[in-house]
Image (cartoon, grey):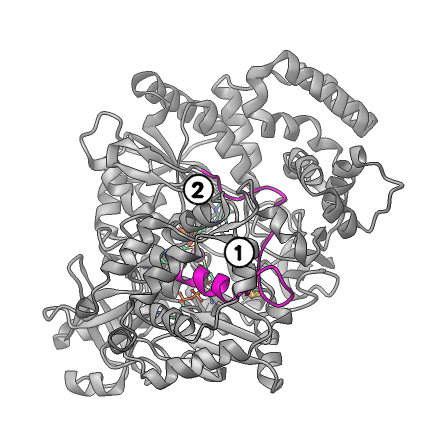
Amino acid sequence: MSSQAWRKTACNLCYINCGIEVMVEDGRIAKVRGDRDNPKSQGYLCNKAGRIPFYAHHRDRLTAPLRRRADGEFEAIDWDTAIAEIASRLRALVDRHGGKSIALYGGGGQGNHAGGAYVHAMLRALGSRHVFNALSQEKTGDFWVNGHLFGSQTCHTAEDVHHCDLLFVIGANPWVAHGFPNARDQLNQIRKDPARKLIVIDPRRTETAEMADLHLAVRPGADAFLLGAILATLLRRDAVDHEFLAQHTTGFAEVKEALSRIPVEAWARAADIPLGEIERCADMIVAAEAMTVRVELGIQQGVNSTLNSYLEKLLIMLTGSFGRKGTNQLHSWLQPLWGNTPNQKFAPTDTEVIAGLLPPNMFPQAVLTDHPDRLRGVWIDSSNPANTAANTSEVERALRTLELCVVVDVAMTETARLAHYVLPASSQYEKCEFTLFNFEFPTNYFHVRPGVVPPLQGTLPEPEIYTRLSRALGLLPGDNVLAPLREAALRSRPAFAAAFRAFVAENPAAVPLGAFLLYSTLGPSLPDGTAAAAPLWGAALACAKRAPEAVRRALRLGDEVPDAQLGDALFDAIVNSRSGAAITTHMYEEVWSLIGHPDHKVHLAIPTLLEWLNRLDPAVASAPNDYPFILAAGQRRMFNANQIFRDPAWRRDDPDGALLINAKDMACLGASDGEWIAVTSRAGRIVARCKADDSVREGQLALPHGYGQSYPTRDGERLSNGPRVNVLTDSRNCDPIAGTPYHKHVAVRLEKLPMAEAAACEELSRRIHQ
Ligand SMILES: Nc1nc2c(c(=O)[nH]1)N[C@H]1C(S)=C(S)[C@@H](COP(=O)(O)OP(=O)(O)OC[C@H]3O[C@@H](n4cnc5c(=O)[nH]c(N)nc54)[C@H](O)[C@@H]3O)O[C@H]1N2
Ligand SMILES: Nc1nc2c(c(=O)[nH]1)N[C@H]1C(S)=C(S)[C@@H](COP(=O)(O)OP(=O)(O)OC[C@H]3O[C@@H](n4cnc5c(=O)[nH]c(N)nc54)[C@H](O)[C@@H]3O)O[C@H]1N2
Ligand code: SF4
Ligand SMILES: [Mo]
C-alpha cells in the first residue's frame, strides 16, 4: 500500500533556502510546492525547486563507506571499520606533524550547516583551525572591508529590497541567482511601480538588466573605474549626505581627498560607459529616497575584488543609504557563519586568514609547498573542490599528494574519486538540517528542518559520523558519563541548564566539544528528531543576551517572560517551528548597535584601499593579445545549482552548458550556432558547445557554473557532463588581499575543433543525455 503525505522542509539549491512542502510517496519525494507558512519566503519558489527529487534520489548516491585500494579502485567497508581506520590515521598524522597539518575544506553547502558545528569542533579538538570553503572564493574581500568599516568581519550588510525605491544591482543577476528572498516577485514589483527604479551594472544584458531603468554594460573587469567615476561624480555635485556622514561615520575627509583625484572622463572611458550615462546614474541616485545596493560575484569574483567591495560600501555610505527603511543594513546573527580574524596569517603560504577562512585558491600551494607546516591531511565535507576551486589540475595534484584525504558527501564526486576514504552522508531530506544563511533585516529568520524521508540505507547524518569519530579518537567522554545530563534534559530545561553548567565547570576541557555534548544530552529531548540542532541552544542564549528587545519583538513576547528565560524561548521557537521562525526584529535605528567599533560609527578611511584606488591605471583594462576573449567562468543559469545535482536529467534546458558568445565574434571565428569549440586559457583547455547570444558584449564569453560532474550511464559507464570550468582558471589570477579568484575574468582564446573531435563530443553528449 502506498503512503502519501506533505512534509515541510526547505529548498537546498541556493542560500535563500525557501520554505517548501514535499509530497512524500513511499519514502521518496514526489512533488514540491512552496510553504505558505514559511514567514520568510511565504510560499515563493523558483523554477529549480520542483526538480529537488533529482538531488534526493539518483543512481550515484553513496550507500557504504569506501576505502581506496592500492590499485586506485574503491572497496566498500562497514562503518565500524571506516571509523576505526580513519581515527587511527588522523591520530597518527596529528602525532607526527601536529594538528595544524590538517585542514577542513567545506563544512556546509547551500542547504546544510548542521554538520558544520560538529566537524569544526572535531578539527579544533585535534588542534587545527585551518578552514577552506566557498565563502573564501567569493566573499572574504567583502568581509575584510567590513572588518575595517564596521569593526568586525562578522558585520555583514543586508538589503531592504522590499522597501527601496532604487535598487542598484552591481555584478549580480538576481532574476536567475536570487541572493535575496523572493527575488523575482521583488523585481516584478519594482518594474511595475513607476516610482521605483532599477540600475544594473553588468557587462551582459542579463535577465535582470532587461528589467532595468538604466543598464550600464561595463567593460568586463572595469567596475572599479566605473564605481570610482560614479562616486567622483556624486562628490563633484556635492550630492553626498553630509549630515549622515557627520553623525555616523569617521574618515570622510581622507575618502573625499582620494575620490576627488579621480579623472572621471578617463575612468568612464576605461569602463566603456558614456559620461552621459554616469550623469544619469547620479541623477537617479540623487532622486532616490531610499537606495539599496545589491552586489555579488560580478564584482566579488571580478578584477579588483576587495577594492570593488570597498567602493560599493562607499556608495552606500556617502549617499547615507544605510540604517533607514529601504536601504542597506547590518543584520543580526543567531550564530555567525564565519569568524573575525584580523591580522592573522597562514604561514606555509603567507596568506591572510580572513573571517577564519583560507582561500581555496591557496589550497594547492598549501599542500604542495615544502614548508614544514604544509597541509598533509584534508577533511572535505559538502564541497567538491576538484570541480569548484580554481585550477583543476593543480587541485587534483594536491589532493593526490595528501597523506590523508577523507570526503563526506552524498554522492561520488570528482573529489571523492581522489580521496582515501569516502563516507556516505544521508541527504538533506533524510536528516535534520538548517543553514546559517540568515541575512535579513529588520526581521531575521531561522529554519530548523527535520528529515522528511527515511535515510538511504548505509548512510549516516554528519552529527552521527562526527560523534562516532570523536569517540574513536578518544575526544568524547563515554556515554555513561553523559547519562545524567540526558536525564536532566528530559526533566526540564532549567534542570538541564544547571546540570550542563556544572558539568562544564568540572570539565573545562570539554568546552570545545560543546556541540557533541549538547547533541548527545539535550538532543534526544528535542521535538521531531531535531537533535542535530542542539548546539543552537548556546547560540540562542547568546543571541537573546545580545539583543533582548529584538528577540522579544520577533517572538511577540512582553515583559511576562524575564530576560533570563528569553534564550530558551528563542531556542524553543526555533526547534518547534516546522516552517522557520523569526529570531530578531530590529528597529531601523538599532542598526548602529550592530556595529563592532566601540564608537558605533562606520570608519570610512581604509588607507590600503585608498592607495590601491589611486594606483589604478585605466590603460591596463583590456585583454592580452594571445588570449583575446574575457570569459566569465561560472555563470548562474536557470538550470544550474553549484554541484548539488549530478543527474543530467534534472535540467530542463541547456543540457551541455553552452558557451555564450556574441554573434559577431562567432562569425569572425567562422563557427556556427551549436558547434563544439575549444576554449583555452593559460591553465588548461576544455571543449564546449557554443551558443550565439547577443546579451554578451563582443569579446566577452560566458560558461556556466555547476557542470562537469561525471555520472553513470544506464550501462554503468561514468561520463562527464558539460564544462569543467575550473580547468581554465588559474589560482594566481586572484585578489591581492583576499586571494579570492577573478573567475569572472579569465583570458581565453577560441579554436574550431577538428571534425573527429567535434563528432566525439557530439556522441558523448548524446550518450550522457540518453
Ligand atoms: N541558478 C542558480 N542560482 C544560484 C546558484 C547557482 O549555481 N545557480 N548559486 C548560488 C551561489 S553559491 C551564489 S554565490 C550566487 C551568485 O549569484 P550571482 O553573482 O548573481 O551570479 P553569477 O551569474 O555568477 O554572476 C553575476 C553576474 O556577474 C556578471 N559579470 C561578469 N563579469 C562582470 C564584471 O566584470 N563586472 C560586473 N559588474 N559584472 C560581471 C555576469 O554577467 C552575471 O550576470 O548565486 C546563487 N544562486
Ligand atoms: N569557476 C568558478 N568556480 C566557482 C564559482 C564560479 O562562479 N566560477 N562559484 C564559486 C561559488 S560562489 C561557490 S558557492 C562554490 C561552490 O562549490 P563547493 O563549495 O564545492 O560547493 P557545492 O558546489 O555546493 O558542492 C556541494 C557538495 O556537497 C554535496 N552535498 C549535498 N548535500 C550534502 C549533505 O547533506 N552532506 C554532505 N556531506 N554533502 C552534501 C554535493 O553532493 C556536492 O558535492 O563554487 C565556487 N566555484
Ligand atoms: S530561490 Fe533558491 S531556495 Fe528558493 S526555490 Fe529557488 S533555488 Fe530554491
Ligand atoms: Mo557562492
Q: Which residue is mark 1?
A: 157
Q: Does the stretch in magenta take in 327?
A: yes
Please indicate, yes or no, whether residue 414 appears anywhere in the rendered image: no
Residue 680 drawn above or below residue 591? below
Q: Does the stretch in magenta take in 370?
A: no
Residue depth check, mark 2 versus mark 1: number of the one nearer the observer = 1
Residue 45 drawn above or below residue 594? below
Q: Nearer the viewer, residue 531 or 655?
A: 531
Q: Quadrant of the C terminus?
A: bottom left
Please indicate, yes or no, whether residue 152 appears anywhere in the rendered image: yes
**Amino acid beneath label 1:** Thr
Give the residue at x 22% y 43%: 397
Residue 170 drawn above or below residue 245? below
In this rendering, position of residue 256 left or right of residue 338: left
Q: Quadrant of the N terminus?
A: bottom right
Main SS of the magenta part reads loop
Q: Nearer the viewer, residue 401 or 228?
A: 228
In this rendering, position of residue 463 left or right of residue 135: right
Residue 45 drawn above or below residue 56? below
Query: Residue 331: where, in percent of width, then height?
Result: 60, 52
Q: Nearer the viewer, residue 235 or 71?
A: 235
Question: What range is drawn magenta here?
Answer: 311-340
Q: Secondary structure at mark 1?
A: strand
Give the residue at x 71% y 60%: 38
In this rendering, position of residue 459 left or right of residue 386: right
Q: Secondary structure at mark 2?
A: loop
Query: Residue 601: where, in percent of width, then height?
Result: 54, 49
Q: Which residue is mark 2?
A: 355
